[in-house]
Amino acid sequence: SGQSGNSLLKNGGFEKQTADSQPDIYKADNWLKSSVEGSISGRDTDPHNGSGHYNLYNKSTSGVQTIYQEITLSGGKTYTASAYVKTPQMTSVASDGGAFLQIANTNGTALKKGNILSYKTAETIDNGWQRITVTYTPSSSGTYRVCLVWNHAKGTLKADDIQLEEGTAEG
């Protein structure tokens, strides 16, 4: 990625990656992941900005891949999370499937979900990258998860430049 701006998240561009348990599989520092019927790996082949991005891969339309970072948010303040994603290898998608950002509690329960990107992105526009967002105002201060979810869509989602900023401003 390379973009940092005023983001409250760490390593949102996935520039810092360390080797994971398998060869050629990397994990991005500061990010946790949850994988069902697929895989999640750091890559450097096709970033939006900088040198790193994440691939979230579903083997079928029943797969769910999630990357997230836990962060303390202040009650009553509005926050906007954003990410750049592309879906060049998506082959099929369930009716509820696609890529979206969500704010969740520390158990992973969704509190606010952003709009779902559920189609194959066009490579002719910004090399296929599209920005998705979610805005959330917590009622109380505490620890929350900022999550990027690749839900019930077969194929690969590429993700980069995940940010969290105060307010509703476009980052």
Image (cartoon, helix red, strand yellow):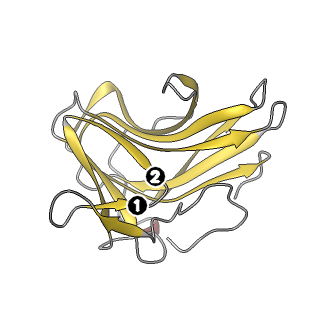
Which residue corresponds to mark 1? 28
x, y percentage for residue 21? 20, 56
CB atoms of marks 2 and 1 within 8 Å: yes
x, y percentage for residue 31? 46, 52
Indicate whether 75 appears above or below 39.
Answer: above
User: Would residue 134 be visible to someone looking at this image?
Assistant: yes
- Between residues 81 and 22, which one lies in front from this camera angle? 22
In 3D space, how far apart are the residues under numbered discs 2 and 1 (Cα atoms)? 6 Å
Return the residue found at the far front. 21
> At x 78% / y 23%, what residue is drawn?
139
Going by the image, does 62 lie left or right of 42?
left
Q: Quadrant of the C terminus?
A: bottom right
Helix, strand or loop at label 2? It is loop
Going by the image, does 48 lie left or right of 91?
right
x, y percentage for residue 27? 34, 59
Which residue corresponds to mark 2? 31
- Between residues 9 and 81, which one lies in front from this camera angle? 9
Number of other residues with Cα within 10 Å of mark 1, as a class: few under 14, some 14 to 19, many 20 or more: many
> At x 71% / y 32%, what residue is drawn?
142
Identity of the amino acid at label 1? Ala
